[in-house]
Image (cartoon, rainbow, N blue to C red):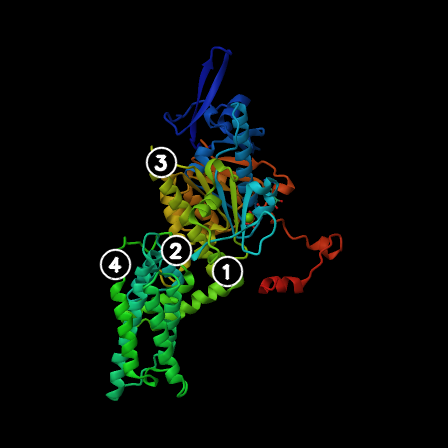
């Protein structure tokens, strides 16, 4: 016989009732010695062993098949407070368990509010990042209290998914743009800072215009100085000079509408002057490059730009804005603006800017993605936080489901990473702004976690790619989330592919069936030795049965998870081949409609 000590059952007589109360505590103070009696527990003792402390009995999640179906009731503070990992093979019941935990927690909270004689809804926040789009149906009964975000176009209670590019941090932009350290990254950061500060309230429009004028003047100077090389027999400059002049004319006309007299008149004068320069040359052919223009004309334009710039206030004196600040700017302007910054600074970044420009334009032009990252008109940041993290008192519902199923795969990591970071930082700011430093308890659920918090590998490519970024964000939440009230729930079929840092921070595990060797070994390493025996059951667990272990339970135990009725299950039932084959189930298909929707024709 072998013995695995897991806990201590203490008894305390309850004099008022004339009974004995039992309580199980974690750990063992006095070890049994040879010759001690072995006792079979009474039903009350079993109840006390699997049921935990009275103070922990808050949410029933299932029953214990090994202990005459005694209820297994957990404390959400423990379950969500120190991160939970739900692991198991495909179809083993993870999503149902997660959906159940949300639902049963909310039901229990509502009941507790009623029992206390209070009125109101649970002040709870659950945010589900749902790559397979399974959770919407499971919570359809919540009606408009379910905040369901989907890639536009949306119907009914669905809301358009909105992860605006102006909310991305400098780090996130670096990953999207593949900006290299050296010249590219500082340039990108400077461009972001300038665009964001240009949009700040309190910064006069004139200051922004001044920036543009100075950068145009610098570009003309650059053209003029390369021009002299041509005369010395150097390479023929291929700058598109006509394009630059057109941009100057166009911008000055635009700026003129935004400012008062006399600046507006001076801007219009530059617009006229520049247009004349272009038209004068156009009458003699199709001007394009620097040497299609007169040097004196270019010098005149530069002089006008400089003269006006000197009369405008300098942006440099305005308060500095970091590249991470969540301030709106027009993302369409980024590539063009970087071009300006680059010509002022010199450096060989033209290739980077044109590929970045193409990438940004491509993303914004994509009918689905463009609507997600560049929504027009933009949402304000405050509204965004209310929508995604949940309004005061959870008045707009306790649950947000972010359906990621139609987010293009090349950007899904950045979208998840931005969402997770903003949720985490909003809770950090909440605690900082709270008079006594209280936190706002929030649960962030990540389905298919192995795709987003992947274990690092040597052949992962450059460190600055979106999947690294995503892992870093979740590693940070796993390490620090608890302090700010953010609990993480990870669901994954491939625990051996998950980041070890994130797994190591999970204090509670719900283990469904796991057949694969690598995954079993990994799980065995995560848990204390003395539950090894229980883990032998893992490959043969039926669906709905799972092993619960860790912080939320005094001892590891087998749970038969509560049954979820069909309409409350995440939609991922096994495909019904036979019924469809044999016409027992109707399944019509209209590919043209799908093709149209897919390609963005509505
Ligand atoms: N608690 C439950 N109540 C009712 N049915 C369940 C429960 N748990 C699992 N099932 C059944 O098992 C099926 C698969 O469960 P689920 O979709 O949760 O698996 P999964 O582990 O999330 O799979 P995947 O990794 O492929 O997402 C469900 O469609 C459902 O029929
Ligand atoms: Mg699932």
Question: Which residue corresponds to the image point at 35% horizontal and 76% vertical from the top-left?
Answer: 274
CA separation in Å, label 2 and label 1: 19 Å
In the picture, measured across the screen, residue 184 lies left or right of residue 558, that is left
Residue 303 percent coordinates (x, y): 26, 74
Image quadrant holding the C terminus, namely: bottom right
Q: Is residue 180 above or below residue 399?
A: below
* Residue placed most toward the observer, 46 or 273: 273
Residue 146 percent coordinates (x, y): 55, 43
How packed mark 1 is, by other alpha carbons closer than 10 Å (few <14, some 14-19, many 20 or more), is many
The reply to whether residue 287 is in sight is no
Helix, strand or loop at mark 1: helix
CA separation in Å, label 3 and label 1: 36 Å
Which residue is denoted by mark 1 in the rendering? Answer: 369
Question: Which comes sooner in the sequence, label 3 or label 1?
Answer: 1
Which residue is denoted by mark 2 in the rendering? Answer: 469
Q: Residue furthest right?
A: 583
């Amino acid at each position: 016989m072998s013995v695995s000590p897991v806990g201590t059952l203490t008894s305390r007589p309850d004099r008022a009732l004339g009974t004995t109360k039992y309580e199980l505590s974690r750990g063992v103070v006095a070890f049994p010695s040879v010759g001690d009696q072995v006792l079979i527990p009474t039903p009350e003792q079993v109840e006390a062993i699997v049921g935990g402390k009275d103070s922990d009995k808050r949410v029933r999640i299932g029953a214990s098949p090994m202990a005459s179906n005694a209820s297994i009731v957990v404390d959400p503070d423990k379950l969500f407070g120190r991160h939970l990992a739900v692991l198991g093979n495909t179809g083993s019941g993870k999503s149902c368990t997660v959906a159940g935990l949300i639902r049963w927690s909310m039901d229990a909270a509502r009941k507790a509010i009623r029992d206390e004689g209070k009125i109101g809804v649970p002040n709870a926040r659950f945010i589900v990042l749902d790559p397979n789009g399974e959770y919407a149906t499971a919570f359809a009964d919540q009606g408009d209290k379910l905040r369901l975000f989907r890639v536009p176009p949306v119907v009914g209670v669905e809301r358009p998914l909105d992860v605006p590019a102006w909310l991305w941090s400098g780090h996130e932009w670096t990953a999207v743009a593949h900006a290299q350290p050296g010249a590219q990254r500082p340039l990108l950061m400077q461009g972001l800072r300038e665009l964001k500060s240009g949009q700040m309230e309190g910064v006069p429009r004139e200051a922004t215009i001044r920036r543009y004028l100075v950068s145009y003047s610098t570009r003309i100077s650059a053209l003029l100085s390369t021009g002299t090389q041509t005369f010395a027999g150097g390479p023929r400059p291929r700058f598109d000079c006509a394009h630059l002049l057109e941009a100057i004319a166009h911008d000055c006309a635009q700026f003129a509408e935004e400012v008062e007299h006399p600046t507006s008149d001076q801007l219009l004068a530059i617009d006229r002057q520049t247009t004349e320069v272009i038209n004068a040359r156009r009458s003699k052919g199709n001007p394009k490059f620097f040497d299609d223009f007169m040097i004196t004309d270019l010098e005149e334009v530069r002089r006008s730009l400089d003269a006006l710039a000197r009369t405008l206030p300098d942006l440099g004196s305005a308060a500095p804005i970091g590249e991470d600040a969540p301030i709106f700017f027009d993302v369409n302007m980024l590539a063009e603006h970087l071009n300006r910054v680059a010509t002022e600074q010199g450096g060989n970044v033209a290739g980077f800017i044109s590929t970045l420009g193409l990438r940004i334009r491509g993303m914004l032009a994509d009918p689905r993605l463009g609507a997600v990252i560049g929504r027009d008109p933009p949402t304000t940041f405050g509204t965004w936080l209310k929508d995604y993290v949940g309004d005061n008192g959870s008045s707009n519902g306790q649950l947000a489901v972010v359906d990621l199923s139609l987010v293009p795969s090349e950007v899904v990591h950045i979208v998840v990473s931005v969402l997770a970071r903003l949720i985490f930082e909003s809770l950090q700011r909440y605690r900082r702004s709270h008079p006594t430093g209280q936190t706002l308890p929030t649960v962030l659920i990540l389905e298919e976690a192995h795709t987003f918090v992947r274990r690092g590998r040597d052949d992962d490519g450059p460190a600055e790619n979106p999947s690294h970024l995503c892992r870093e964000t979740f590693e940070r939440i796993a390490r620090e989330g608890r302090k700010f009230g953010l609990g993480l729930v990870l669901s994954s079929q491939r625990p051996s592919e998950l980041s070890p840092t994130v797994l190591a921070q999970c204090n509670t595990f719900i283990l469904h069936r796991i057949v694969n060797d690598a995954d079993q070994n990994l799980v065995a390493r995560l848990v204390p030795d003395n539950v090894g025996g229980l883990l032998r059951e893992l490959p043969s667990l039926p669906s709905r049965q799972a092993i619960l272990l860790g912080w939320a339970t005094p001892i590891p135990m087998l749970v038969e998870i509560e049954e979820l009725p069909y309409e409350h299950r995440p939609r991922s039932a096994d495909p019904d081949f036979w019924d469809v084959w044999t016409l027992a189930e109707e399944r019509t298909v209209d590919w043209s409609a799908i093709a149209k929707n897919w390609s963005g024709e509505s």
